[in-house]
Image (cartoon, grey):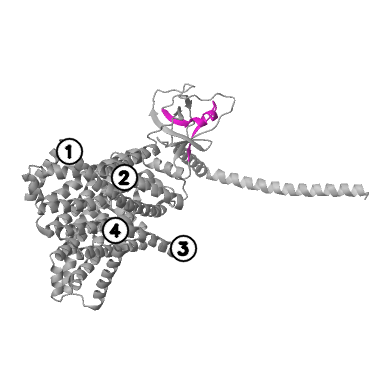
Amino acid sequence: MKVETRVGLFFLGAVITVVAFAWLMGVVNPFSNSYALFVQYNFAGGLEVGSPVRVMGIKVGKVESIEFVPDQRDQQGNEVKLKIKISVSKRAKEALRGDSKFFINLAGIIGEKFLEITPGSLSLPIHEAGAVVRGEDPPRIDQLLSQGYGLAGKLLDIVSKNEGSVGHTIELLDHLVTNLNRTLVQLDKTTKNVEISTLLKTCGI
Amino acid sequence: MDELNSFETYFKDVLRRTLSPPWRKKEVVIQLDAIGVQSVPIILFSISFAAVVTIMEYAYHMKLVIQTANMVPGFAALLILRELGCVITALLLASKVGAGISAEIGLMRITEQIEALRLLQIDPIRLLVVPRVLATILSAMALTVLANGACVFFSMLMSISNLSYSMGTYFSAMNRFASFKDLILSLIKAAVFGFVIPIVSCYYGLSCEDGAQGVGRATTLAVVTNAISIIVLDFILTWLFSHLY
Amino acid sequence: MGFLNELGRILIFVGKILKTIKSKSINCPDLSRQIYRVTIQAISITAFSGFFVGAIMSIQFNSQLKEFGALTVLGGLATSATLRELGPLLIAFMLSGKIGAYTSAELGTMRVTEQIDAMRCLGTDPIEHLVVPRFIAIVLSSFILLLVGLLSSIIGGAALGKIVGGLSAQEYFNAIPHFVTGWSIALGLFKCLSFGILLATVCTYKGYFTQGGARGVGRSVISTALITMVGIVVVDWFTSYLARSLEFLWTS
């Protein structure tokens, strides 16, 4: 093989490898079999560009971009500040209907966030490319926690401030339960007595 | 100090002549073959072993940190593209090519061929140094690409067999962590290394002292200086690039 | 065929060296001079490059761990990776350049200027006086140099941990005992020993058997560099595999 041929092959191999990398890394997508949707949120819960998009648990696309739009409003006229553009494979298009919900879920314990779309009912229309939908804001764990703290604090407050009456209430409850118990036992005996007397009557004694 | 002055003039000479025609294409092609094509088997062979070991080590460390080896392909692909591919290739080139060039040119020097060239009004820098510089830059980039490809391929094989991944999940994991930008950055690193190695090696070759001893000394200095320069440059470039990640 | 030929010659050569070590008394002043020279030659560049290697590892791991918020383990992780893996590898590369090339050039020059033949004529065994001291010196100094390289890579890593990751030196060093097990240290040391032996064998062999004048010397240096490089990577893989299997068997 001539020198030039070898060198040519060498560089050809290198260029092919670069193209292979480009294709595998999603830079070049010669098959445009996905369409775009815009989902509005007020809180994205850690979703990032490149996070996967799943429909019924199957990956169909990814988050393309996340935009801050301070003056954006949804169909009900409420403010939604985030606009997230996602790419969805065309094969999932039929599944997404007017009442599909767009959640942000956590995959596993140290997993990453992904966008989960539930399929809609057949009666409602399909989302077209470029449609804008309102997504379900994920629960704010931090807010929940702080609320939980607040609640726990209040409970502790009540108990500590009203220790006397709380103790008293518990005592009363105790008495109540004991009495109820006794009454039930009596009732039981009485019932048994009534049964036996009926039985005896039936037997003609 | 004397050496430093002449290195500076030498460096400026080489730079000026690299950036202006004529470039002696035939020489460049010959060098591309010697430096690039003939390094392919060695580099691919060594890099594949290095890739396998890296994956095994990564899996071990991951298990220590987060008790699971699930993130290994992602992280490993990242390290391969950013560091392993270009640096190990560069170090291998530093030895092979560095020793080769400095020995070759050193030999020409002590057999007075360089003097002869000057007498014939042929510029030795244009004939010898510039083609090697161009060839090494291009070869380093191409070799890094091939090395990266081989590394990724082998780590994919390891992930499929040892960590029960599939091809699809491997590439998703890889894409989650690495991006095409990393490949481009590694190419830039490779070009820088490819620029430095021939310049240093030719310098030591051209200033070679007489006799077998001189050649030996020139080669040793070339290999050592190349290796150190690569590590220092890698540090600088890694730091610079870390701001771009 | 040629490869097996070569391999056989190398083994015979090593056999001669080992026999010489066992039977004859080791020439102590010569040996210590060699050790001194080899170590001093390489110590500054080893420390220097070790620092940078540690720094590079630190930067790389920093960006990866930041995503997990697990920055506190940076010290342990970087040190462990360097000790087990990169440390021996990179330092071996350094040494193969500095010491390997130098020794094969030195012995090669002696050979082509017929000094070795002259020694034989005068009844001195060149292997005993030239090769053995250098061989032992290289094996021993790879050990010492690895330690130096490791220490400086820990320092380099800590420095960068501070600059890039904002970790204090304390945090960095604290993580180390959690990650660096006895097995890791043993692995690192074993790798260094293997690399040292490999390097010593290849460079003395190639230098001793140089042929063909100045060109031959150049060729020897190149072969040394290449064979050592490929050899290091293969031995690295082999020792890792071995150590992993042992570790696995031991802990299970």
User: Measuring 22% from the left and 78% from the top, which residue is drawn there?
Assistant: C24
Q: Are marks 3 and 2 on the same chain?
A: no
Which amino acid lies under the numbered mark 1 shown in the image of this protein?
Trp
Report the quarter where the N terminus of chain A lies: top left
Q: Is residue A94 magenta?
A: yes
**Image x and y of residue C56, in percent:** 27, 49
* Secondary structure type for disc 1: loop
**Image x and y of residue C119, in percent:** 14, 72
Q: Are marks 4 and 1 on the same chain?
A: no
Q: Which residue is mark 4?
A: C88
Q: Vertically, is A8 above or below C43? A: above
Q: Which residue is mark 1?
A: B23
**Mark 1, chain letter?**
B
**Mark 4, chain letter?**
C
- What's drawn in magenta, residue-wise? A82-106
Q: Vertically, is A57 above or below A130? A: below
- Which is closer to the viewer, label 3 or label 2? 2
Alpha carbons under labels 3 and 1: distance apart = 63 Å
User: Measuring 55% from the left and 31% from the top, which residue is drawn there?
Assistant: A119
Q: Is residue C250 magenta?
A: no
Q: Which residue is mark 2?
A: B82
**Image x and y of residue B45, in percent:** 33, 53
**Mark 2, chain letter?**
B
* Secondary structure type for disc 2: helix
Alpha carbons under labels 3 and 2: distance apart = 35 Å
Q: Which residue is mark 3?
A: C252
